[in-house]
Every structure is written in C-alpha cells, then in structure tokens.
C-alpha cells in the first residue's frame, strides 16, 4: 500500500509541475496545432474515403462535395478558382444557430490555426493545388473533431454534386 501511495504522489507532483507553468501565464503563447486522439481514430476510419473524394473533386470545376457530420450540417468543398485548388466552407452560427453552443472561442481559434478565414457567411479556406488530397481530408476530419466536436457518430456522409451531362 505504501508503494502505491508514493507512486500516486509522484504522478500528482509531475502533473502539477507540468500544469503550473502554463496556468501561471496571463497570455499563453499558442503552441502547435495538435490533433486530439479521437481525431486520429476518425482519420484512420474516414481519411482514405474523404481523400479519394478530394481527388475526385479536382477532376472537374463544376463538381461539389458536401461532408455531412450531422444529419443537416455539412462542410462544403468545391474546386477553387485556380486549377487544382479546393475551396472549403465550414459552418458558423449565422448559418446554423445550434453552433453558438459548440463554437467556443478556443474552437474558433482552432479553425483560425488551420488557416480558415472568419466567416462572411461561413468560415473558408482555399487549399493549394499541390496539397495532397489525403492531407486535406485529414485536416477536415480533425477540424470536425476539434472545432465542431464531431465524435464519429453519425458516420460522415459524403454527397457529391455532379455537373449536368
């Protein structure tokens, strides 16, 4: 029992020493953007499928892709103005009022850290032509997890918008 107590005290002390320096700062410096462990699981589950959809999206400037993460809310991606680029729009509370409770200042900071611009109507980002589709897919899934609190259920639904024949 004594060994167990000493180990618990050591673990608590280590946690305290790590937490105190950050808590003591009045304005902590932003660190590198980290993906939560759950985001990695979702990327492993859905990344390849979303990456393939991003590749498909680049094939025709008239295509569109909707990534539903709730039954009625989605991230929309379309080919960008320059060849090979992709423009993505992420929802904001102006369009989806229920997001007022979800998009905390910390979560909005996560969108900004990923390069998403403040909303006109929605948060937006242009992905460059050279960015690999799987990297874009991983970032989108991580943002859904980190900013929108998506935990994997319901499963992502990808809806393609096809150009007219």
Image: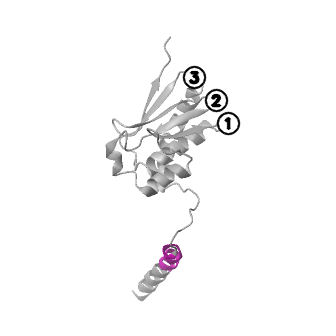
Q: Is disc 2 surrounded by few (<14), some (14 to 19) or many (20+) residues within 10 Å? A: some
Q: Is residue 122 above or below residue 2?
A: above
Q: Position of residue 99 (x, y in %)?
A: 35, 46
Residue for point 53% across, 50% down: 112
Residue 84's disc number:
2
Q: Is residue 118 above or below residue 161?
A: below
- Distance CA(mark 2)–CA(mark 3): 9 Å
Q: Is disc 3 surrounded by few (<14), some (14 to 19) or many (20+) residues within 10 Å? A: some
Residue named by callout 1: 130
Determine the image quadrant of residue 4. bottom left
Q: Is residue 98 left or right of residue 3?
A: left
Asked which secondary structure carries label 3, the reply is loop
| The one of 9 and 143 positioned closer to us in this rendering | 143
| The one of 148 and 155 positioned closer to us in this rendering | 148
Q: Position of residue 116 (x, y in %)?
A: 53, 45
Residue for point 57% across, 62% down: 31
Residue for point 45% across, 57% down: 106
Q: Is residue 39 above or below residue 73?
A: below
Q: Residue furthest top?
A: 165
Q: Which residues are magenta?
A: 14-24
Residue named by callout 3: 61
Badge 1 or badge 2: first in the primary sequence: 2
Badge 2 or badge 3: first in the primary sequence: 3
């Amino acid at each position: 029992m004594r060994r167990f107590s000493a180990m618990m005290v050591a673990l608590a002390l280590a946690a305290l020493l790590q937490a105190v320096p950050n808590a003591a700062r009045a304005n902590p410096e932003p660190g590198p953007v980290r993906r939560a462990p759950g985001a990695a699981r979702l990327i492993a589950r859905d990344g390849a499928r979303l990456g393939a959809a991003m590749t498909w999206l680049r094939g025709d400037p008239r295509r569109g892709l909707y990534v539903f993460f709730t039954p009625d809310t989605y991230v929309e991606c379309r080919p960008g103005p320059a060849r090979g680029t992709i423009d993505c729009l992420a929802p904001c509370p102006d369009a989806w009022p229920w997001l007022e409770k979800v998009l905390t200042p910390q979560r909005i900071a996560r969108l900004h850290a990923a390069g998403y611009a403040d909303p006109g109507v929605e948060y937006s980002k242009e992905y460059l032509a050279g960015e690999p589709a799987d990297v874009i897919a991983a970032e989108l899934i991580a943002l859904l997890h980190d900013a929108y609190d998506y935990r994997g259920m319901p499963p992502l639904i990808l809806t393609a918008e096809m150009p007219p024949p």
